[in-house]
Amino acid sequence: MGAYIEGRDVNLTFRPPSRAPVPALRHFDIEVNEGEFLSIVGPSGCGKSTFLNVLLGLLTPDSGNLSVDGKHITGPGTDRAMVFQEFGLLPWRTVQGNVELGLELKGMAAAERHDISGRLIRMVGLAGFETHYPHELSGGMKQRVGLARALATDPDVLLMDEPFAALDAQTRDLMQVELLRIWQETRKTVLFVTHQIDEAIYLSDRVMVMTRRPGQAKRMFAVDLPRPRDYEMRVTREFNDLKLEIWNALKDEIVV
Amino acid sequence: MADIAADIPVPRASFVARHRRALLGLLAVVVFLAAWQAAFLVVPFNPLFITKPSLMLAGLLDMLATGELVDALGASAIPFVLGLAAAAVIGVAVGIVMGWRMRVGYALDPLLTVFYASPLVALAPLVVVFFGVGTGAKTMIVFLLAVFPFIFNAFAGTRAVDRLLIDVVRSLGGAEKDLYVKVIIPSVLPYIVAAARIAVGRALIGVLVGEFFAASEGIGYAIARFGDLFALDRMFACILVIMAIAVALTEGIRWAERAAFPWRIGQ
Amino acid sequence: MSDIEALDSGIAAADRADAAPARGLWRRYEPAILGTGSIVLLLAAWEALPRLVTLSAGTKLFFTTPSRVVGTLWDMFATGEIWPPLGVSAGAFALGLGIAIVVALPLGVLLGRSATLSALLDPFITAFNATPRLVFLPLVMLWFGLGLWSKVVIVFIGALFPLLINTYEGVRNADRLLINVVRSFGADEWAIARLVILPNALPYIVVGLRLAIGRAILGVVVAEFFGSAEGLGVVMVRAASSYHVDVVFAGLIVFAALSLVMTAMVKLVEDRLQRWRPQHANG
């Protein structure tokens, strides 16, 4: 097939040491095109975050094929980077220190690192906060640092695991706009996991709905709205029709 | 969509897996004792220097039979319990007053911190000289060592009472009595129990210090005496008894804390 | 007035009675003034007591006053007679604490990383931690005699456990999320330890160090009371039995001062290392 990111029949079951095994992914298939923004929505526990972690290389599937740009995934690599829901910033490092984390691990020299981190910190709108510590930042600011850090190593694929879930609604809306702005500049391939259908449609080219655990791909929806996306699009007829369709596909999977 | 039940069996984790930690611990202790006992098959055994688990057990059983052990423990228990009880009552009272009345807290806090930080054990010789050898001195030493955790924890607990909760109870029509019963005491109680945990350890030290110094009875005295007599099997047996008591007390209180105050995280 | 209003105004009145008059200077320094004030008051009362009240012959034998204690303390330093015993005590303290640090830190890291190892050692650590090490003193003296080494062993046992347990907690407590984050950027085990585990454990280790210092000093005092030929503690015991109470207090002051000074130094280091923490966070 040759899609940029390709997953075929991915299976993964968690086996915690003193409890019963938990199947997370079963026969999971996915295809993502280069430069595409794809959102995955699904009920809680359906395995969407698990899949991102598999793609990131932190988890190994029990079976199945998974490749990025034709290369099989065997572990973490600089071609993929993640933005985490709980930010995951090292609290003992400044903003700059955090952004440069991946570059340090690559063995890059200090001057070059400062160059890149400086540029990215400006790009995400945090100029002037380079020497601040995470505890001095708001949630939105912390997530911008997370984004800058993920972009620093210039990955081909950006993975985002419910990155705005920990933010309040207003900040969340603003961050969505910011994310699109930054994405337009860099045009990475993005896999975005979320609970919110609004968010998924607003941001993406396509939206995938997953079944409940153990997760499988249920349906794929194309988002035909023009770019650059506009906040006002969220109140249009087409937006809300699509939202209803996706909701209908999703609601049967939700277990209260 | 395939049926989950059909091809993914969900067995319960085995007994061993669930209790892994405890079983490993038990294994370690058993192996340790066995190795200790067996070591003397290769290493010469000098009874003046070391003892074996088998001899320890024999000594322990013997002491139980003669009632020696119970007598010794009883003699130690009196100053322990008395001193601890006095420390709890006085310590908590002082702590609560300090916490409730800001000025008293300001005044006493530095003074008490200095006391707490000093090795008060150093005053033990003085106490013994003053009170003479016996239960009185031991009780005093236990009290001096055990009172501070109660004071400081009661102080902190009272200060930490959530004003919001007081407002809530007041707004629901609570009287002063209700404030105490429904908010203050439940808030402070966990701190006091935690203090008890610490104080118990310090009280044990107090008893031992008192008995090592100049006593004629008690478990600490027994250990010292057995040491002088080179009766290592009984000495070790007594040490183990104290270890068991210490662990039982501290872990017991810890368990009670968790059971009674499940809403407390940390501390 | 309803009950609530009455309560409200009652409590408000109590609060106002407690609150300082609205003069900035007083309010700022009130805690310090009250604190030092009470200490001064206590010392003054103690000093004045023998002059105000006639003590029985027995009590007079071992009553002393702050002025006498200070005088004795001064003498001990001026004549230099305090240095040899203090040196002996300090040496045992340093040696015991040093060995404890060298053993506790790597072991703590190892235990934090390996659940199996910590499960195996758990019963021993719990048992020894709960037990007052004083109980081992006769045994230690039997094995090591009356000299330096029995003191060192007692200090070591006392200092080991807070350090070990705190290091272990600090390592175990490392945020799994952060480990995953760092691993996703390509960190190997060493890098994970350097970037996440050690910085996270450091505040815990420092707290453990503070506790260990206190316990180490207690260890020296106690070991010297019962089973030693030299040291400041020995001086104190001899003084007690010959009713030189002022020497006993002087010795206590020296030990307490040492404890406070070292704890303060550790706090300084701790504060410097913790600039990244939100205020009021405590390990």
Image (tube, rainbow, N blue to C red):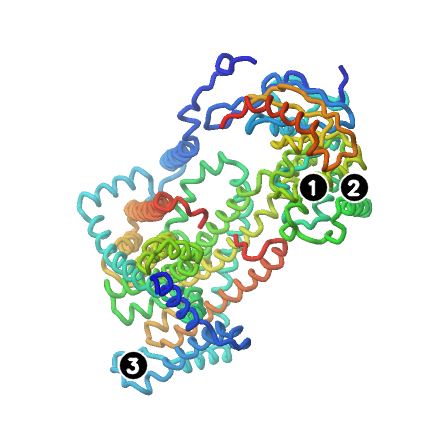
Front one among A48 and A231:
A231
Q: Type of residue at label 3?
A: Lys
> Vertical placement of A104 versus A50: above or below?
below
Along the line of sight, the residue nearer the viewer: A45 or A170:
A170
The residue carrying pointer 2 sits among few (fewer than 14), some (14 to 19) or many (20 or more) residues within 10 Å by Cα, namely few
- Which residue type does callout 1 highlight? Met
Q: Say which quadrant the N terminus of chain A sits in.
A: top right
Verify CB contact (< 8 Å) between mark 3 and mark 2.
no
What label does residue B257 carry, if any? none
Q: Could you tell me which chain the residue with mark 2 belongs to? A: A
Is A88 on the left-hand or right-hand side of C62? right
Residue at the spot 36% in from the left edge and 45% down from the top edge: B251
User: Which residue lies under the disc numbered 3?
Assistant: C60
- Using the image as rendered, state which of residue A164 and residue C243 is in the foreground: A164
The CA distance from mark 3 to mark 1 is 78 Å
Local crowd size for mark 3, using a 10 Å CA cut-off: few (<14), some (14–19), many (≥20): few
Mark 3 vs mark 2, foreground winner is 2
Are both tags, 3 and 1, on one chain?
no
Q: Percent from the top left, x then y, of residue C161?
A: 46, 50
For the residues labelled 3 and 2, the Cα–Cα distance comes to: 76 Å
Q: Which mark is residue A108?
A: 2
Q: Secondary structure at mark 1?
A: helix
Q: Residue at x 45, y 46 (%)?
A: B265
Between discs 1 and 2, the one toward the N terminus: 2
**Callout 2: SS:** loop
Q: Position of residue C116 (x, y in %)?
A: 49, 34
Q: Is residue B173 visible?
A: yes
Q: Position of residue C66 (x, y in %)?
A: 41, 80
Q: Disc 1 designates what residue?
A: A175
Dot 2 amino acid type: Met
